[in-house]
């Protein structure tokens, strides 16, 4: 299911919109026409304000009824582990879904079609539909575009068999509505193929809480996760840059246990920067200037400062980079693009798409500002993160347009750098006229 965006944001392409119209929108318009007769609804279509997961479930039901199949029946729902209140909430949502589905099939009209009634009865079970909604919550994938921005939700039955791992050997990406899963490292025979259900750029404490709450399981800690946590939570204190661990998350703020002494001082520092950031977002005026002031406090303080890979440092650098680009402050934007790239390389595996994409953005800015050698270096590292001779499949195989753009950036930077080198050489080398004058002067001096 594709999200709707404002004019300032990315929108699904016309081909995707047309495909969605053929698959979903016509059925929803038919349901809207019958909406006046749907129990308890008036005015606009009842699903307009529904959460994305509920609309996704409705569309899956529409397709299932049309094809006379229910391919989702084998999906894990963890129904028995849900609270009674949550089960009741899902059953109420299921009843609304079935009402809209019935309206779309014309079952509330004066002339009922027997085939439509029969197709509806195959799925018209509130408890089973509620369990399907629970399964959607557990198994739906967040669909992203080439820049890893969230654009919608999708339910992929075959991909639902992939389990979670804290150190996954596979990674998912999307080509339009198609889900592609690739290995991200060599996989020995017999090793289970796994993806990660949570961003590796989050603290393991946050990821494990998400797994428990949303997927109903937990995972043990690992050495790799602990090492990444240290990078994500390091705060440097004092002139000797003593390392103190203070976790932070954009949604939940401070993470971890309460602390005393130097740790408490570092926690107060992170809390202060967090609050300054919130005030800067809400304040009127030049947002970039206010965010830059927060950045200086966060990264250049004498008493405390965020470590090179701290999660707050990465999040703040991303926001500043985007804000500077929006205001065409290119010199400032490249500073924060370099920060984003440096942080990403500390946190994620070398061939991870997040690393390659941050380098690709940086290469564009370096070229735009005439830093040709840096543009070549960043572009090549983005394309060949694993050291291979061709662009890494993990990031660029499913982003071919973006890969071609980066290749063009590298090629253009090479041309500009060579032209600049020739220009410098021409300036340094004396012209033929100068050589003649110098030769003549030497000859006259010899006559004297």
Image: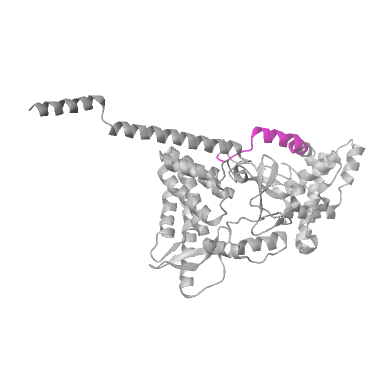
The magenta stretch spans residue 28? yes
Magenta region: 8-29
Q: Nearer the viewer, residue 361 or 32?
A: 361
Where is residue 243 drawn, in percent x and y?
A: 47, 67
Query: Residue at position x 54%, y 36% from top?
Result: 405
Query: Residue at position x 69%, y 41% from top?
Result: 177
Query: Residue at position x 26%, y 30% from top?
Result: 430
Above or below: residue 231 compared with residue 377: below
Where is residue 209 drawn, in percent x and y?
A: 65, 63
Where is residue 95 drawn, in percent x and y?
A: 81, 51
> Which quarter of the rendered picture does the C terminus lie within?
top left
Q: Main secondary structure of the magenta part?
A: helix
Q: Is residue 38 visible?
A: no
Find residue 253 and report its image quarter: bottom right
Above or below: residue 302 compared with residue 76: below
Q: Nearer the viewer, residue 342 or 5?
A: 342
Above or below: residue 83 compared with residue 258: above
Query: Residue at position x 69%, y 55% from top?
Result: 188
């Amino acid at each position: 299911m594709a999200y709707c965006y404002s004019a300032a944001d990315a929108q699904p392409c016309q081909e995707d919109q047309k495909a969605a119209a053929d698959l979903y929108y016509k059925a929803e318009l038919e349901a809207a026409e019958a909406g006046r007769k749907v129990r308890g609804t008036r005015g606009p279509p009842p699903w307009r304000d529904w959460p994305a997961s509920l609309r996704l479930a409705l569309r899956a039901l529409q397709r299932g009824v049309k094809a006379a199949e229910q391919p989702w029946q084998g999906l894990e729902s963890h129904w028995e582990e849900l609270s009674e209140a949550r089960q009741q909430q899902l059953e109420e949502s299921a009843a609304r879904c079935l009402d809209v589905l019935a309206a779309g099939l014309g079952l509330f009209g004066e002339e009922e079609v027997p085939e439509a009634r029969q197709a509806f009865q195959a799925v018209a079970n509130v408890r089973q539909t509620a369990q399907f909604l629970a399964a959607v919550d557990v198994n739906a994938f967040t669909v992203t575009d080439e820049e890893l921005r969230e654009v919608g939700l999708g339910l992929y039955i075959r991909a639902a068999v992939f389990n979670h791992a804290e150190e996954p050997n596979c990674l998912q990406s999307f080509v339009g509505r198609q889900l592609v899963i690739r290995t991200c490292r060599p996989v020995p025979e017999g090793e289970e193929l796994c993806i990660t259900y949570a961003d590796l750029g989050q603290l393991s404490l946050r990821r494990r809480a998400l797994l428990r709450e949303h997927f109903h399981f937990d995972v043990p800690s690992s050495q790799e996760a602990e090492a990444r946590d240290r990078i994500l939570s390091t705060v440097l204190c004092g002139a000797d840059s003593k390392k103190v661990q203070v976790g932070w998350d954009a949604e939940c703020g401070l993470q971890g246990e309460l602390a005393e002494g130097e740790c408490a001082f570092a926690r107060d520092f992170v809390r202060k920067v967090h609050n300054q950031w919130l005030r800067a977002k809400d304040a009127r005026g030049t947002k970039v200037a206010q965010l830059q002031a927060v950045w200086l406090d966060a990264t250049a303080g004498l008493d405390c400062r965020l470590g090179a890979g701290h999660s707050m440092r990465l999040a703040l650098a991303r926001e500043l980079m985007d804000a500077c680009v929006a205001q065409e402050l290119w010199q400032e934007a490249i500073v924060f693009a370099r920060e984003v790239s440096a942080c990403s390389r500390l946190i994620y595996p070398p061939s991870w798409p997040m690393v390659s994409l941050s380098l690709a953005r940086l290469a564009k800015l370096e070229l735009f500002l005439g830093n040709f050698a840096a543009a070549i270096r960043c572009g090549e590292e983005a394309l060949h993160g694993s050291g291979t001779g061709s662009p890494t499949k993990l990031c660029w195989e499913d982003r071919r347009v973006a890969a071609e753009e980066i290749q063009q950036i590298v090629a253009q930077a090479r041309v500009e750098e060579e032209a600049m080198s020739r220009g410098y050489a021409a300036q340094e080398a004396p012209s033929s006229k100068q050589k003649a004058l110098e030769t003549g002067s030497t000859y006259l001096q010899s006559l004297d």
